[in-house]
Amino acid sequence: MEEEPVVMPGDEDEPVGPKKVGLRTLHFECGMWGGADHPFVGRFARGNGRKTEEIPSRFGPGNETDPLSYYQRKGDTPYVLSGQRSELRSRLGWAVIRAIYDGLPDFQVRRLESMGFGPFLRLEELAPDVALIQALKERWDPECHAFLFPWGHMVPTLEDVVRITGLRVDGQAVTGTTYTSYQEPVERLLELEVRGERSSLVGRTALQASLGVASARHRMGEEQEEYLARLTEDARAVLAEEEGEAEDRDLRRFLILVIGKLILGTRGDPVSCRCLPLLEDLTQVGSYAWGAALLAHLFDSLGTSSRETGVARFFPLLQVWTYYHLPSLRRGVARRRGAVPLLQRWRFCHDERSLRRQVTLIHDAMDTIPFGHVQWTPYVGEDDATQPSVERGRPYFGRDIWLHCFNTVVPLHHGLVARTLGLHQAVVEFPTRQRSWERPGRSFRGIQQVTDWTVRVREQLDDWERRGKEVVSEAASDEDYYRAYARRYGAQVYRGTRRPLDPEGRIASLEGVLHSTIQQRDDLQALVDQLRGELERAQQMVGGASSSREDPGRSVLEGQLAAAAARAEDTLAQLREREQELRTALAQTTALEAEMAELRLRPEAAEATRWRQEAEAAARWQ
């Protein structure tokens, strides 16, 4: 896909720079209510001049020998202010939205079901694994919109979105015109006010209050079930029970809350009304590809600065995506086997170690995952009949396609992950940042002008309407891709503390070629077994030499099968020899790189020793 220059004004609510956080700030701002209402667990940082003092958790540090084994079932994820870099925090309002949804009249629930939001709104809240999301964010390449791992590119696809969230990924693109001010449509359709003259934001508290939830704070000693029941009753007492203009207004308010805080969430407390023009005709709301917009919004968030401090986008998608594709990193436990959407099957187990410690251990695990443990096709065997949205979205699966969410227009490079389609990964041109508006950090602040995105990005919109371009691959193995990948990224694919010194990607390339050879060996072994089985059945059918003279055709078939089996076994033997050679070369290269690293460090160590001796000598003379 060619990438055309597109001007992106960006979101008004996105800050110009990283959020400034004092050293006394507690970093566990989960949910729509403030972090101070949560039980105090984990660690926090205390300011003391320039230094940062860590207060240890009362629950202990966990099992340091196994980075992914020790979890606590209750409590909130600890957020630690490191003093050197900003950490991600969750800003979703899942519990409040679910409580309001449960308080809606039955006819409103049926309307939401017909729009396709039913499965998504019935999802139970998944506690955020902030450490996992932070580690993934640090491996995101904004140039190709994919994660970089030692085994190659990986990227969430439209199939992942629909299977995990249940949101629709087919239909009309979520796009239209953005305005300098949304005051008129907000007053007319929601009977609320925006936060400024040139703004698309409404206050989250005012929006919740209009739906019956005047206060979303926990009361002293209130259990979670009691809290949700209270919010549901408050919403039920306010929401209109009869159909008419009032019920349309209530439904639009609720949809703005769902879309603005969950699907297309922002990092600030206010809720964006950018999509309000699409909600004016409620009969058309269900025709939009909200799942594709969620993915575009998520890609845009992953491409922001690593110093960003909020996880505003729908992070559970990445969390569950990791559970299925990288089971070695699974930090959750199954709670409802067979439930759909797939997000309902998991519960995150909280880890009480410091956030930075967790992120480091996750990076170490990512660097050492065997290539064969990566699940490229984890949904084989799923019952698609239980998810009609999967069947509707299938024409959009396995395609390079542009994703749209108003001013966010990003490419989904499915060709980089052809292995998710059961194909071998061919060498492709790795995308680079060539568009003038594509930036490594945040969007520009403010809505600059009235822009009709259906005209501004007409070519990309036509691509969506054509359903993109189908991904095909004629590669017989992944070897060439692994070599090209290692040459392009080298040591960038390693992020952990125990990463090998592999600046030119020799180790990663050999590991990839070895893995590809093992795959070929396994495939060929299966073919040999099949041929031998066919040969044995043919010999039994012939029934001996006398039968062969009576039926020459069977004898010829037997000879052809025997020759094919012999050729396959010869090739298999050659592959096994090559596998052994690659293992030897990998071991030698790893040892050589380690020796070179030691040689590089020796002068530095000698210099440090000399400085220490001089400092000690100077101290003795004082």
Image (tube, rainbow, N blue to C red):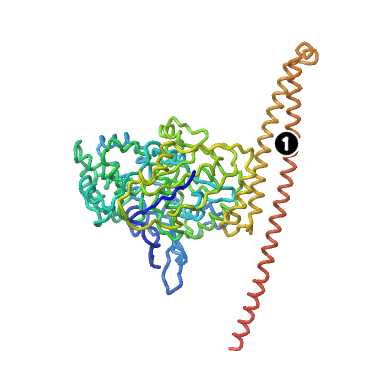
Q: Is residue 129 left or right of residue 548?
A: left
Quadrant position of residue 564: top right
Q: Position of residue 114 (x, y in %)?
A: 32, 34
The one of 404 and 273 positioned closer to us in this rendering:
404
Residue type pointed to by label 1 = Leu
Q: Position of residue 527 (x, y in %)?
A: 68, 31
Q: Position of residue 381 (x, y in %)?
A: 51, 33
Quadrant position of residue 472: top right
| The C terminus sits in image quarter | bottom right
Q: Is residue 109 left or right of residue 359?
A: left
List the residue tagged with mark 1.
572
Residue at horizontal 74%, vertical 21%? Answer: 558
Q: Position of residue 227 (x, y in %)?
A: 30, 49
Element under label 1? helix
Residue at horizontal 26%, vertical 35%? Answer: 106
Kindly tell me whether residue 562 is visible in this rendering: yes
Residue sitting at the far bottom: 621
Kindly tell me whether residue 97 is visible in this rendering: no
The one of 100 and 582 positioned closer to us in this rendering:
582
Q: How many marks?
A: 1
Mark 1 nearby-residue class (10 Å; few <14, some 14–19, many ≥20):
many
Residue at horizontal 56%, vertical 52%? Answer: 366
